[in-house]
Image: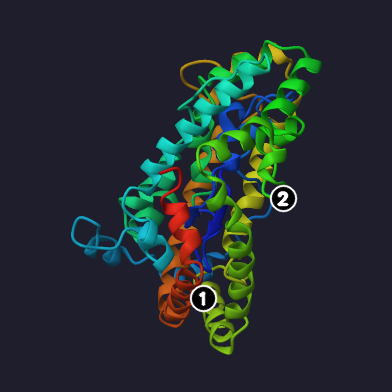
Amino acid sequence: MTRRVRFRLLDPRRCGPVVLAVALVVLVASACGGSAGTGTADSVDAARATSTLSSSDAEAASAPQPNDDAATTESVVSGGTPMAASSPIGAFFDGGFDDALAEYTTRVEESIVVCMAAQGFEFAVSENGRTNEIEQRQNELTTREWTAQYGFGISTSFDSIARNQTSDPNVEIFFSMSASEREIWSQTLSGGDIGDAVGGDFTGRPLEDQGCIGQALIETGGQEAIEGLTTFGDAYEEGEEALFDTREMVEATDAWARCMSQAGFPSYADLDDPEDDIRERLETVTAPMSAAIDNLSDEEGQSLISGESLNLEDLPDLDVQALRDLQDEERALALVDLDCYEAEVQAIFDPLRDDFENGLLTEYATEFSALKNIGS
């Protein structure tokens, strides 16, 4: 799975869907994603889950239904705002940033190849898994269009993430080595252990201590942008917390919860609860598969993810029908959530968010400029 350090765009309803790629450290490490010693458990665990949606037949009968009319009245083609550009920070990066990031990532990986070769190891530039196609659709669809197709982007991302694990040349490289060689390879690549190389948190260490990945980022001009993210991230989190503590947002959240209860979902009190519920339920669906994958031999793990495509039916102990049912329920829940959000929260939240993000764009103008022009 392509991994990126991301700051979530300030949207109180969405953790996964509305995100902004703002660093490359983990992204470039993902060329070996899914090739850890335990096989592909990390690769295909998009998210996880255990509770059930609570609603009675009586509540559902009287509940407001998803706004089908809204889904047909606005689209990007007819002038609607793409989901990815629906906030000031999103709009700042709208217009080719993903393509520029992909080009820069290739340059970084090419530099990693040279660095690893100089120390006697093989590494391959890989386009595999670089783009999350569901996230990319945020550039083409409005929030409602995207929600109708992908819900929150949690269980509905499973297929895309699983497909992106196939045909990575670094999987073959990794599995061709002994256990001790893998540790040295990982140390050379990331400056850390296998967990770091596959997807650990690199942001807490200086680039100089991050092996060939860090060296490549420095050589290709990414250091300034990456180092500026730490203070920005702290400021973002603090400001977000303060915003949700305001009287206006507390009241709006309470109104949203009442709307969700009337729609048949009385257990949701906070704006993140529906997504957390889906994540927990996905964990239940994928837990048997994860356990089975953990027990695969190296050869079985390599065989599973080394083909040109991955059929979900081939994943051990995955109940594909249960996954499909959860995906349908996620889409339905997300549309009800969106209706309640638009009715009770949006008019309060959007101006607060816009002021907050515009302030950050001004305060961190140098860092944002360096990020947008990374490697140029």
Is residue 109 depicted above or below 101 in this figure?
A: above
**Residue 143 appears in the picture as rendered:** no
Which residue corresponds to mark 1? 262
Q: Quadrant of the C terminus?
A: top left
- Does residue 355 lie above or below 147 as drawn? below
The one of 75 and 175 positioned closer to us in this rendering: 175
Residue 93 versus residue 212 in the image, above or below: below
Tally of numbered discs: 2
Q: Is residue 359 above or below residue 89?
A: below
Residue indicated by mark 2: 204
Instruction: Count residues near mark 1 (Cα–Cα under 10 Å), then give few for <14, some for 14-19, many for 20+.
Output: some
Q: Amino acid at mark 2?
A: Gly
**Relative image position of residue 276 (x, y in whole percent):** 63, 58
- Residue type of the residue flagged with mark 1: Gln
Image side of residue 218 versus residue 192, left or right: left
* Mark 2 crowd level (few <14, some 14–19, many ≥20, 10 Å Cα): few
Is 251 on the left or on the right of 74, as rendered?
right
Farthest right residue?
180
- Would you say 282 lies left or right of 331 here? right
The CA distance from mark 2 to mark 1 is 44 Å
Q: Residue at x 36, y 41 (%)?
A: 99
Q: Measuring 33% from the left and 47% from the top, which residue is drawn there?
A: 96
Mark 2 lies on a secondary structure that is loop
Which quadrant, please, contains the N terminus?
A: top right
Q: In the rendered structure, find residue 208 and report the number of the disc placed on it.
A: none
Left or right, 273 with reference to 130? right
